[in-house]
Amino acid sequence: MSDQYTRLTRRLADADPDIAALIEAEGRRQHDKIRLIASENYVSQAVLDATGTVLTNKYSEGYAGRRYYEGQQIIDQIEEIAVARAKALFGVEHANVQPYSGSPANLAVYLAFMQPGDTVLGMSLPMGGHLTHGAKVSATGKWFNAVHYGVRRDTGRIDFDEVREVALRERPKLIVAGGTAIPRTVDFAAFAQIATEVGAILFADIAHIAGLVAGGAHPTPVGHAEVVSTTTHKTLRGPRGAMLMSTADRAKALDKAVFPGLQGGPHNHTTAAIAVALREAAQPDFGTYAHQIVANAKALAAAMTERGFDLVSGGTDNHLILVDLTGKEIGGKPAAKALDAAGIELNFNTVPFDTRKPMDPSGLRIGTAAVTTRGMTEKDMPQIAAWIDEAVTAAREGKEEALDGIAAQVRDFCAAFPIPGWSQD
Ligand SMILES: *Cc1c(COP(=O)(O)O)cnc(C)c1O
């Protein structure tokens, strides 16, 4: 054997102890904390296995049967399985599993159906929309005429009067339904009615809720929206990636937009891992998982309300809770930093009609997909709410020394809930 070959076959720990040690440390961190970041999850060992394979070596520009590189005998089969599973799971006529992530997937939708300067109507970022729904700092806000809707001040829910009013006035080509900080069910039928009225294409972005939709814990946009995008790594619990789904008549434009419009070769190791995740999501126990995510979010919301936390819209229908800390007299950023030190990981977030700045807004965003994967249930949520309350109170009172104590309790608690891909020994 040549030295070169020996070098190539060394495992990570031997080949690069620096990075191996950091990955090990990240595994421990993910294990020892209560992860409440609403966009995160823990993927299965099978998904991890598929991701770290020789599929990463292959170039496959094009689509199955129509590639620009040779040697696609196996890759074509993998991508065809992923596509078939996506179509079956979501009940769609067309699926494209190649988008590198949610943002490029959304950009492909714009490329498919819009010209620069055309009008898009999406939820505004501070109200709960995503950057790619026309936010000023995003390409979607720079290259298109983005107009926005938000939520009602009194209910914290999407203001459909406003959606309709803006749609009638601005005549958007594309209406985006969905977001990153929406704690309530998205009424895709109501969006579809407005889209039909103004002749717009309805585009549902289910990045956050795809796992809930697949598991029957949130109504599907299919049948209402002609185009659906999703990430694969949030509640759907797959690798980092994305999918576009649509009716048959929108298929060609979407496929052309992804490749060659926006991307080169697909990430085949990710495609395989998406296929694995879609198979997992088609099992009956995934429906149980999806419903448990919602049950946990509702239990956590109730426990937090009991402790005097003010929740946007007063609660949750899905995996996500948006906390307004205004009444607690602490900003979202110092609260999130204190919680992280206490072993509870989440993110600061704007709340609708926020009076503070985006880099230190009034809210916290919480999600239950990851803790549910670890097997935590409703009975564990009051304890989590108690630790959140203790840490926020400690931060407000400047008693940072209390946070270490909470982190130690959290670590002990987490030891009972193993994660795939990392263990104590
Ligand atoms: C997460 C998210 C995206 C973007 O996904 P990335 O993979 O981070 O690019 C797009 N839309 C919504 C609604 C999201 O929540």
Image (tube, rainbow, N blue to C red):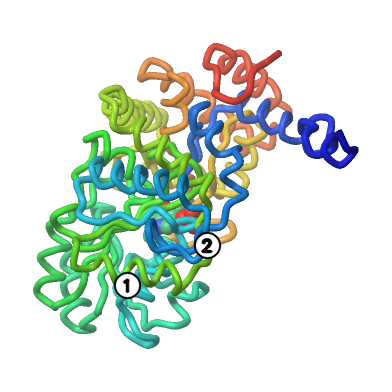
- Crowding near pointer 1: few (<14 within 10 Å), some, many (20+)? many
> Which residue: 58% across, 56% down?
360
Please state the horizontal and vertical placement of residue 327, each as a whole percent of the image: 45, 45
On screen, residue 65 above or below 343: below
Which amino acid, by three-letter code, is at mark 2?
Answer: Tyr
Please state the horizontal and vertical placement of residue 194, each as a whole percent of the image: 13, 69
- The C terminus sits in image quarter: top right
Q: Mark 1 = which residue?
A: 148
> Which residue: 52% across, 30% down?
388
Q: Is residue 350 visible?
A: no
Element under disc 1: strand
Which of the numbered marks, if any, corresponds to residue 69? 2
Q: Quadrant of residue 260?
A: bottom left
Which of the numbered marks, if any, corresponds to residue 354? none
Apparent side of residue 202 relative to residue 341 in the rendered image (left or right): left
Depth order, front residue of 167/16 = 16
On screen, residue 393 above or below 327: above
Depth order, front residue of 5/239 = 5
Which amino acid, by three-letter code, is at mark 1?
Answer: His
> Which residue: 72% across, 34% down?
23
Please state the horizontal and vertical placement of residue 126, each as a whole percent of the image: 42, 62
- The N terminus sits in image quarter: top right
Element under disc 2: loop
Please state the horizontal and vertical placement of residue 12, each as a whole percent of the image: 77, 33
Apparent side of residue 151 relative to residue 200 in the rendered image (left or right): right
Q: Are marks 1 and 2 in contact (CB under 8 Å)?
A: no
Q: Residue furthest right?
A: 3
Which comes sooner in the sequence, label 1 or label 2? 2
Depth order, front residue of 362/194 = 194
Q: Quadrant of residue 276?
A: top left
> Which residue: 14% across, 77% down?
199
Q: Quadrant of ligand 1?
A: bottom left
